[in-house]
Amino acid sequence: MKLMKTASIYLLLMLCVALCIFPFLYMFSLSLQSDADILSGVPILVPEMLQFSNYVDIWQKAPFARFTLNSFIIAGGITFLHLIFDPLIGYVFAKMDFPGKRFMFVAILSTLMIPFFIRMIPLYVLTARMGWLNTYQGLIVPFAMSAYGIFLMRQFIRPIPDELIDAARLDGCSELGVYWRIVLPQVRPALVTLALLTFVFQWNEFLWPLVAVSTTEMRPITTGLTLFNQEYFTQWNLTATGGVILFIPSLLLFLATQRYFVRSVMLAGMK
Amino acid sequence: MAVAGIGNGMAALLRADRLSQRTRRALVAYLLLSPAIVYFTVFFFYPIGLEFLASLHTGQPLIGESRFAGFDNYMTAFQDARVRQSVIVTLAFAIGVTAASIAIGLGLAVLLNRPIPGHAAIRAIIFFPYIISFVIVALMWQAILDPYTGILNSILAELGLPTQSWLSETSTALPTLIAITVWKDVGYAMLIYLAALQSIPSDFYDAASIDGASPAQQFRHVTWPLLTPTTLFIAVVSTISQLQELAPAYLITKGGPADATRLFSLHVFEAAFFELNIGYASALSFLMFLLILAITFVQFRLLNREVSY
């Protein structure tokens, strides 16, 4: 009876796992098929001849190297700025006292209610006026901080004992010194969480590059691939090859930090 | 130059002995906060003001010729049949994705909330689609669902079931889009539920089984009520994010067939960036902003009332 129950739970879970993995396997299979395989009209799961040349062709048919570089610069730049600012602002709210603190904190938190889609039009106009369309700064600076990251860091900095911080202040440590030498080392795991989540979600960002970039060489992979699907790749095999390239960094990052990543979301997801 | 001047001035102020410790601390705090003040003003508060202003104009406010029109754009929006259609589609989409994510996510969490071998790996695999770009999700499922070369139809044909052009029939396009989005997002609901399940003390279940409650009764009378705040949280977060979702419609169906999957965000996007009807598009997105604000306030009210372990 107990065995039956465990077996049926396993069966159900395996079905879900298969459903999650299958599309990725199919994409991988498509990326190794020849034009003839695709045009045969019969869907093929395991191609007879693995056409690895798709992975060479794609770099020549589209500036994929540039797209990849752009994605790293944009997602990396945003993550870097988050790591600079989110914990610093979080520290000010967690450990310093000043008039207007509550007001400032509520004002920053209230930006959580202003989703990106709502700001898209005025942000486009603003970026255009600054001459930042089709530039890295136009893709990075509007996402330099997040109220969510600030809130998360404040929650982690608050439990650090005040005595520790006051002792450092008495020893003549400046506020920035306290922050750099006492506070940051204590919240290293939270910083990793912040960096992971920020990088992965910015790597996937699609809407803003679609709006703020019109030149081919400034596109990240997400919009670059979409554009080339529409204009140049008419075959599923090359499209799928681009998809695999876009997906590999996410997969590697996830595999390397999987347990940690899952725990981060469980932790950070509960606001 | 000006910045350096202000910096020197601040430094001089900070050195001045007559300033009390308190004032000095406050000045340092504001100095450290200043990047955030500038950032949130420039990229959040100012744009929202700008957008409201633009929504009161017809033509191309902010970028070209425009004329003040009061609330005309809002009036037009309420009478626009295409807007009405896209609001219905968007609500169906957001509610469909949210309800299915909650049901399936909770089911998976309950199944996985036991020490079976491999549960961490299973959890990770089911969660994985949540962290990949919708661009990949779109192209994978388009390939699978392709009416001529896709593998789903050939599997269905093999099993003797009727084949479908899933994404080009008005009756199946929206449900298919919902299913794809749930496939991507359900892992998030599952993880949040798992975290919540792990925080329910096992004493509750021990007491319930001593009283002779069956597993189904335990779920109904112990698990489900205790998960209410989590369910509310997921419901609100998911509804708000799906209401503004653009990627499924933009990448997979382009809003078709016959506007059957024309999500509100796609409508706004096209009004703004294809038709350059900036005033009208601003009014539409401001209306969406008000709706999201309203949902957020309801969330706060409900959560404050319900949380009592």
Image (spheres, rainbow, N blue to C red):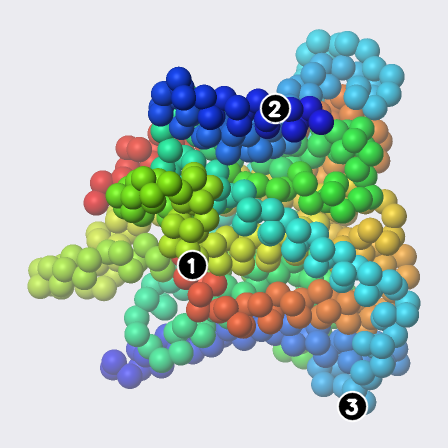
Please state which amino acid type lies under the numbered disc 2: Ile
**A233 lies left or right of B161:** right
Please state which amino acid type lies under the numbered disc 1: Pro
Quadrant in the picture for the C terminus of chain B: top left
Where residue A164 sits in the image (x, y, percent)?
A: 29, 46
Please report, as a chain letter, where disc 3 is located: A
Tell me which residue sits at (76%, 15%) in the image: B57
In the rendered image, the residue lying farthest to the left is B210
Tell me which residue sits at (86%, 54%) in the image: A217
- Residue A116 occupies which quadrant of the picture? top right
In the rendered image, the residue lying farthest to the bottom is A48
Query: Which residue is tagged 3?
Result: A48
Q: Dot 3 lies on which element?
A: loop
CB contact under 8 Å: marks 1 and 2: no
Query: Which residue is tagged 2?
Result: B6
**A238 lies left or right of B1:** right
Tell me which residue sits at (76%, 47%) in the image: A136
Vertical side of B234 occupied by B60: above or below: above
